[in-house]
Image (spheres, helix red, strand yellow):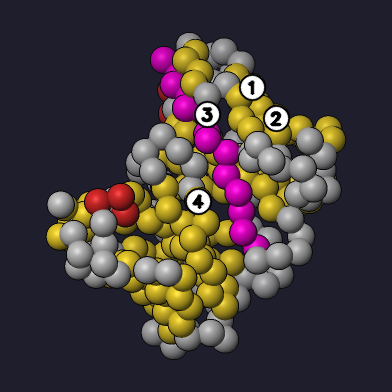
Amino acid sequence: SQKIEQNSEALNIQEGKTATLTCNYTNYSPAYLQWYRQDPGRGPVFLLLIRENEKEKRKERLKVTFDTTLKQSLFHITASQPADSATYLCALGSGSARQLTFGSGTQLTVLP
Amino acid sequence: DAGVIQSPRHEVTEMGQEVTLRCKPISGHDYLFWYRQTMMRGLELLIYFNNNVPIDDSGMPEDRFSAKMPNASFSTLKIQPSEPRDSAVYFCASRATSGRETQYFGPGTRLLVL
C-alpha cells in the first residue's frame, strides 16, 4: 500500500540555522509533490510545489528537492526564525487523480 | 476573496446525534475536498467533488457518513448517527482545475462527540 513518512514527529533547531525536513514515500509514483504549513487551530497553507521532472525549487528562504530515484523530498528553511515554528506537511499528487495524499507532518520549533 | 468558509467552527454533540458540517468553497473553484484530521491518522481524504459531482468517496469511513454538493458554492458533510470515534477536525478544501494543483483549506470544524 502507499506510504508516506515524514522524519521525526518533532524537530527543534536554533534560530538562524537551517531546518531540513524529510518526506519519504513508497509504492507511489507521484507526478508532483507539495509542502504545506499548518499552524495550531488552522488549516494547512500551501508553500511550494515541485514536479517529478524538477530537481529543486526555491522560494525566498524555502528550498525543496525531489529525488524520484530515492523516493524522497527534502524541505529546507534557511535562516530559520521563531515565526517558522509550525507543522509542515508533505503531500503527493498523481497526474490523473486530483486528490492529494498527505504525510503525517513534522512539528518544527525554532528556538530563539 | 474570503477563502474557504466552514461552519460551525466547533461542534460538541452526544453520541447518536446527527451532525452536519458546512463548506463554502472559493468562488470559481470546481474541485471540493473533505478531509478529517486526527493525531493518530493524520490528514485523511474522505471524499471529493468535481463540478458538484462526487468523484471518489473511497475514504468515507462507513455508511454513517454522507456528503452532498447541491451547487457550486455549498457542500455538506453529514454524520448520522455520530460516535465518539468520529471526534476530529474536519477540513474542507477547494482548488481550480487549472493552475498549480494547489488546494486551499478552510479553518476546519472541530467536532467532539461525547
Q: Residue at x 15, y 60 (%)?
A: A14
Left or right: B30 in relation to B42:
right
Q: Are marks 2 and 3 in contact (CB under 8 Å)?
A: no
Q: Are marks 1 and 4 in contact (CB under 8 Å)?
A: no
Q: Looking at the image, is mark 2 or mark 4 nearer the viewer?
A: 4
Left or right: A7 in relation to B13:
left
Q: CA distance from mark 2 to mark 4?
A: 22 Å
Give neighbour class at mark 1: few <14, some 14-19, many 20+ (Cα, 10 Å). Answer: some
Q: Say if the magenta span includes residue B18.
A: no
Quarter-of-image position of residue B73: top right
Left or right: B23 in relation to A64:
right
Q: What residue did someone put label 4 on? A: A45
Which badge, 2 or 1, is on the more N-terminal residue? Answer: 1
Q: Considering the numbered disc 3 on the image, is that residue within a helix, a strand or a loop?
A: strand
Q: Considering the numbered disc 2 on the image, is that residue within a helix, a strand or a loop?
A: strand
Q: What residue did someone put label 2 on? A: B76
